Amino acid sequence: MATTGLKPTDAQIERAVKGDGTAFTALWDMYIGGLGTYLRSSFKYLDDFHVEDICSRSFEKAFRQISTFDPSIGSFFTWLKKIARNTALDVLEQESRMQPLSLEDGMESNVSDSMTDEEDSALDTIIRIEDMEETLRCIEGLPELYRDIARKRLVDGLSYKEIAQECNLELNTVRTRIRRAKMMIDKLSKESDLK
């Protein structure tokens, strides 16, 4: 990508490709509203929860694949909409396969209830306990935007809802920032292992 004549979006993309989480957060801020509008107009039967969830998943995929973005093919937003469309289709297909559970106690089965908090596997829990010092060191190395939220989730064990309430943020913003923080912690941890 040329270093002269870059538009603000191009500069943010260039920084995000280099692993700058704050640049990706800036891209989120630039495009989250438009992406939600696109999903609501393209998939009229999606409720707000699903639109927010698909937006969050789409940005996560975009961040993981940012190095594959080719501005000569189309704009960043066009690329992001394609990811969101495919993500929405995947979500809808998964939900269509799910059979409603018949619960004897009269509780309703609700897809959004099962998506409220991501559960860590037992292995993740063991690793986190064994590597708490490393985790704390990595958390301190995060940009300020992610540091407090990562500490609340990974050290204090707060739920996404509790973090959202404490930080006065949308639930999906918390989810996205925690996912991004975990990715950065993994990267910092791997770099530490190489030293």
Image: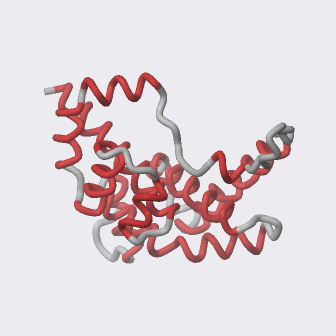
Residue at coordinates 36% horizontally, 44% vertically from top-left?
Answer: 157
Residue 85 appears left or right of 131: right
Question: In the picture shown, does residue 119 fall above or below 51?
Answer: above
Horizontal and vertical percent position of residue 106: 82, 46
Front one among 33 and 119: 119
Residue at coordinates 58% horizontally, 51% vertically from top-left?
Answer: 116
Check the image and tell me how it is coloured: secondary structure
Q: Which quadrant of the structure image shows residue 99?
A: top right
Residue at coordinates 53% horizontally, 62% vertically from top-left?
Answer: 72
Quadrant location of the N terminus in the rendered image: bottom left
Residue at coordinates 82% horizontally, 66% vertically from top-left?
Answer: 45
Number of dots carrying numbers: 0
Quadrant location of the C terminus in the rendered image: top left
Horizontal and vertical percent position of residue 66: 45, 52
Q: Residue furthest left?
A: 195
Front one among 50 and 65: 50
Horizontal and vertical percent position of residue 17: 36, 53
Question: In the picture shown, does residue 60 fall above or below 118?
Answer: below
Residue 116 appears left or right of 143: right
